Image (tube, grey):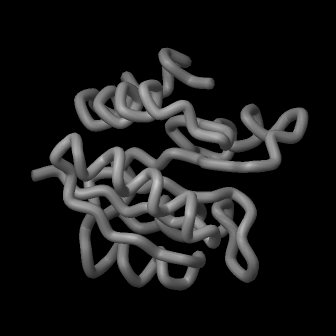
Amino acid sequence: MKKVLITDDKATSRELIRTVLETCGYAIKEASDGIEALRYAHEFEPDLIILDLYMPGVDGFGVLAELRSDEKFSKTPIMALTASAMHGDRERALAAGFDSYISKPVPLPWLREEVERLLDRPRSDRRLGLGLR
């Protein structure tokens, strides 16, 4: 069973994503902030990480930088998630090293497809721009 770590400071967002992905057969762990995300990433060893970009304390960009500096997570697909889709956020997220970007409200059918796509492809093939929103 593939494992997904969902990190968002909004419990309702985590719950919605968890519900959708659990029905698809994924094992889920939730983190409510960047510090928890880093701890759970090492404990849970997820196959995919979904990170809210803008959280209090350590934001998604900070978590991404920390994870990408660790060889253990260099190939783990990481999806950016944000409620405030500001102009340039998508480009900034992809340039920072996120493999995918999605804005809230999350289009649930697309989320399922994107998670499957990210988990089925090697990292070198993930960032070709396919499926990115």
**At x 28% / y 62%, what residue is drawn?**
28
As displayed, is residue 124 above or below residue 55?
Answer: above
Q: Is residue 40 left or right of residue 9?
A: left
Q: Quadrant of the C terminus?
A: top right
Please tell me which residue lies in front, 9 or 75.
9
As displayed, is residue 130 above or below residue 74?
Answer: above
**At x 35% / y 45%, what residue is drawn?**
20
Q: Is residue 82 left or right of residue 86?
A: left
| Residue 71, horizontal then vertical, whole percent | 35, 62
Q: Find residue 6 and report its image quarter.
A: bottom left
| Residue 100, horizontal then vertical, whole percent | 54, 35
| Residue 105, horizontal then vertical, whole percent | 65, 41
Please tell me which residue lies in front, 69 or 36.
36
Q: Is residue 8 left or right of residue 36?
A: right
**At x 56% / y 58%, what residue is drawn?**
13
Q: How many discs appear? A: 0
Q: Find residue 123 and report its image quarter.
A: top left
Outermost residue, left direction?
1
| Residue 87, horizontal then vertical, whole percent | 90, 34
Q: Is residue 46 left or right of residue 84?
A: left
Outermost residue, right direction?
87
**At x 49% / y 15%, what residue is drawn?**
130
